[in-house]
Amino acid sequence: LCRRASGPGGNKGSPVKKCSRFGYIFVETVVAMGLLSLSAFVIQNALRQAMITRAQAQDITSARFLLEKISGERILLFQQPEGNGSGQCDPPFEKFRYEWSLERVDIPKPELPPGLSPEERDVLEDAYIDFMGKLTVRILWQRGGADFEAVGESLVGSSILWTPEDTQ
């Protein structure tokens, strides 16, 4: 494909060669197509990962709002006993399910400051409540075969937690 050509002035022994570019164009085309294919694959993979991440972020945001909704519903109930429950979320959140539990948490009695009068001491001791309620809510869901959960805990006032008179 390459042949010797005469150089300037008709000198036949000149090292200047004229070569055909036909073989090189084919190789350059194949390499360019390979790079283009690899680039398209990388871009497609990045887009797929972006869509997965967006869907996970949307699930976590929905779970957070459901967590607040269920916590609010449980806290608004007055004098409920210790216990737990579970359920499925309403449409359009059917893929989420929830579990909740309300339990008693004992609070140790703090030391009263010295120098209180007996009346002040009696008022503080009468107002002291030795327990609170702890509400735990779990939101559970699946995406792509993987299990996810969001958990929230909140302390609630003793007036929300009903306890029989003999256990207080």
Image: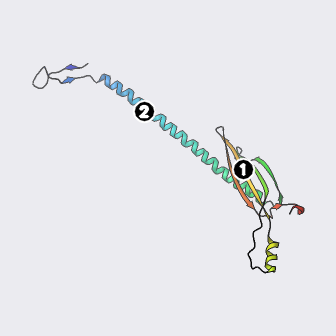
Disc 1 residue crowd, few under 14, some 14–19, many 20+, Cα 10 Å: many
Q: Which residue is drawn at 79% across and 76% down?
A: 121
Q: Mark 2 points at which residue?
A: 36
Count of numbered tags: 2
Query: Which label sits in the foreground, 2 or 1?
Result: 1
Q: Residue at x 74, y 54 (%)?
A: 136
Q: Is residue 40 placed above or below 27 in the rendered structure?
A: below
State the image coordinates of residue 150 (x, y, percent, origin top left): 68, 49
On the rendered image, what quadrant is the N terminus found in?
top left
Q: Residue 138 carries which label?
A: 1
Q: Residue 125 carries which label?
A: none
101 relative position to 60: left or right: right
State the image coordinates of residue 127 (x, y, percent, origin top left): 80, 72
Identify which amino acid the numbered label 1 is placed on. Arg
State the image coordinates of residue 9 (x, y, percent, origin top left): 9, 25
On the rendered image, what quadrant is the C terminus found in?
bottom right
Q: Residue at x 54, y 41 (%)?
A: 49
